[in-house]
Amino acid sequence: MRIFDPHIHMTSRTTDDYEAMYAAGVRAVVEPAFWLGQPRTSPASFCDYFDALLGWEPFRAAQYGIAHHCTIALNPKEANDPRCTPVLAELP
């Protein structure tokens, strides 16, 4: 059976989880961007996180036969910080 997980946070998981997921039949996942528990304070901190979601996690998942997709957004807790408004220019 091939399984698609539409909402999973892999950034905080180990590669053992990818291995177990593949063994259970998971072949594709979607990771939503999320608030990390403390405010990001500059556009660069957002860009680093988005780069990880778009580059590192798909690479890491592919090592275990899983396609990694993501959704990118600003959390309302962070969207009102004027220091971060330039990040909007980085979003598609």
Image: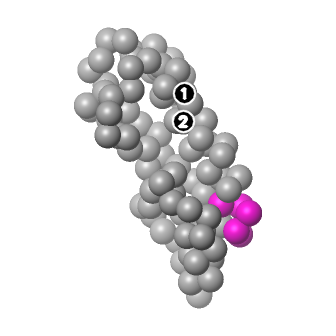
Q: Which colour style is shown? A: one colour
Q: Position of residue 90 (x, y in %)?
A: 54, 22
Q: Quadrant of the C terminus?
A: top right
Left-right relation of 3 to 58: left
Element type at mark 1: helix
Amino acid type at mark 2: Phe
> Which residue is the site of mark 2?
50
Q: In whole angstroms, how far apart are the C-alphas of marks 2 and 1?
A: 5 Å
Residue at the bottom extreme of this rendering: 1
Q: Residue at x 59, y 41 (%)?
A: 52
Q: Position of residue 67 (x, y in %)?
A: 65, 62
Q: Position of residue 58 (x, y in %)?
A: 65, 53
Q: Residue at x 33, y 28 (%)?
A: 39
Left-right relation of 91 to 40: right
Task: Tell me which segment is drawn in magenta.
Answer: 61-65
Look at the numbered discs 2 and 1 and tell me whether their residues touch, using CB distance below 8 Å.
Answer: yes
> Which residue is the site of mark 1?
47
